[in-house]
């Protein structure tokens, strides 16, 4: 009986997630003047980019595109390079930098890294006026990361002959404790309202987003944060696999129906494998426990409401969805409603309401 109840609860979740006619049936979506512009992240480094026609329904004016990562090899080196950035909408290159790639870098090495980043961005293609760096810097890499931002701004502006803004992603803990973590010398920040929990902790219920966790981070310090903050909300799901009680791996792009077809439900978001199986392209042994995590319409509506009450007003704030999925996103009336409720709009004739 318990397993049947859990299965019914999971099925209800799937049906609710697909209810595009009234995704906010169980939660209010407040109209506000919080953001002026909508946008998406495109994190996959392969495949075509969405264009204006696909994004016009969202009134989106730009996309944040992951160009490549900077990882630690024999010094910092690029990985996962996107080669095609063809689209008719504005692109902001995003460079993901791992913490080890910044460790123990000299001033000369930081300058060389900035030059290599600018060179590779130019090779891939760039016609905008903003570059974004994504790095969860720590006390040991703060100076290197902040110096890299300054070097990158100077070099990119010189290369393209126009002012280039450098934005940086900002984690919630970096806002709450900004007096100790420091303020990056960026032109603006992108506050990440996701990946806020303890992913590898068995007692965690949802490491992507929890309202109680968000409230704890968004204290009075957020109004004192000196950088203008855009905000990114999550629209993704994944499975977290545990083997023998220990974190094993993230199962990206795991479909809940795929999981339910081979796993036994334990509770509304926990499943177990009674025999070995392949999920999201990975072999998993019998006994694997999987925590299913997702962010739904009401989570995003709640996050938007909380942010509108805690962040200071800003005329040109952007709201971004992480991340774009050509099948899922284009059918999400909920995301269209979310952008419109936030106050985001598109001034161009090509955008539709």
Image (tube, grey):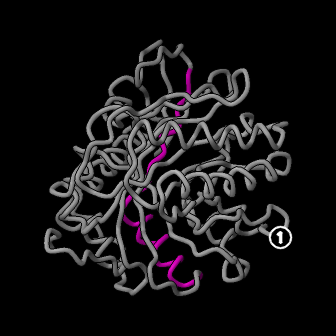
Q: Residues within 10 Å of mark 1 (few under 14, many from 20)?
A: few
Q: Is residue 227 above or below residue 129?
A: below
Q: Residue at x 54, y 51 (%)?
A: 208
Residue situated in front as seen by the camera: 26 or 301: 301
From this viewpoint, is residue 266 visible?
no
Q: Residue at x 58, y 81 (%)?
A: 311
Q: Residue 297: within the magenta?
A: yes
**Which residue matches tag 1?**
179
Q: Residue 52: within the magenta?
A: no
Q: Is residue 36 above or below residue 136?
A: below
For residue 30, side relative to residue 191 (left or right) = left
The kind of secondary structure the magenta stretch mainly shows is helix
Q: Residue at x 39, y 66 (%)?
A: 298
For residue 282, side relative to residue 229 (left or right) = left
Q: Is residue 104 above or below residue 73?
A: below
- The residue range painted magenta reads 288-310
């Amino acid at each position: 009986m318990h397993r049947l109840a859990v299965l019914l609860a999971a099925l209800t979740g799937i049906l609710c997630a697909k209810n595009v006619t009234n995704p906010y049936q169980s939660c209010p979506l407040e109209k506000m003047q919080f953001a002026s512009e909508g946008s998406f992240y495109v994190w996959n480094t392969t495949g075509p980019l969405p264009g204006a026609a696909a994004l016009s329904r969202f009134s989106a004016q730009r996309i944040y595109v992951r160009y490549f990562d900077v990882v630690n090899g024999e010094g910092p080196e690029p990985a996962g390079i996107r080669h095609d950035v063809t689209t008719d909408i504005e692109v902001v290159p995003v460079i993901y930098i791992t913490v080890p790639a910044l460790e123990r870098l000299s001033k000369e090495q930081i300058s060389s890294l900035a030059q290599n980043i600018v060179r590779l961005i130019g090779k891939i293609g760039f016609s905008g006026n903003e570059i974004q760096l994504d790095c969860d810097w720590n006390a040991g890499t703060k100076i290197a990361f902040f110096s890299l931002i300054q070097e990158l701004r100077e070099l990119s502006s010189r290369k393209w002959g126009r002012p280039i803004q450098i934005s940086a992603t900002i984690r919630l803990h970096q806002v709450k404790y900004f007096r100790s973590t420091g303020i990056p010398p960026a032109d603006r920040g992108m506050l990440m309202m996701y990946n806020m929990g303890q992913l590898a902790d068995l007692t965690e219920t949802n490491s992507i987003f929890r309202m109680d966790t968000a409230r704890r981070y968004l204290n009075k310090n957020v109004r004192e944060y000196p950088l203008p903050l855009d905000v990114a909300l999550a629209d993704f799901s994944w499975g977290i696999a545990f083997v023998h009680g220990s974190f094993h791996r993230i199962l990206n792009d795991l479909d809940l129906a795929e999981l339910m077809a081979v796993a036994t439900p334990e509770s509304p978001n926990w499943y177990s494998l009674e025999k070995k199986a392949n999920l999201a392209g990975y072999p998993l042994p019998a006994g694997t426990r999987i925590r299913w995590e997702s962010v739904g319409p009401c989570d995003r509506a709640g996050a938007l409401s909380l942010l509108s009450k805690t962040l200071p007003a800003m005329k040109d704030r952007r709201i971004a969805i992480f991340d774009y999925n050509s099948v899922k996103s284009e059918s999400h009336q909920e995301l269209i409603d979310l952008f419109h409720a936030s106050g985001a709009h598109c001034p161009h004739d090509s955008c539709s309401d």
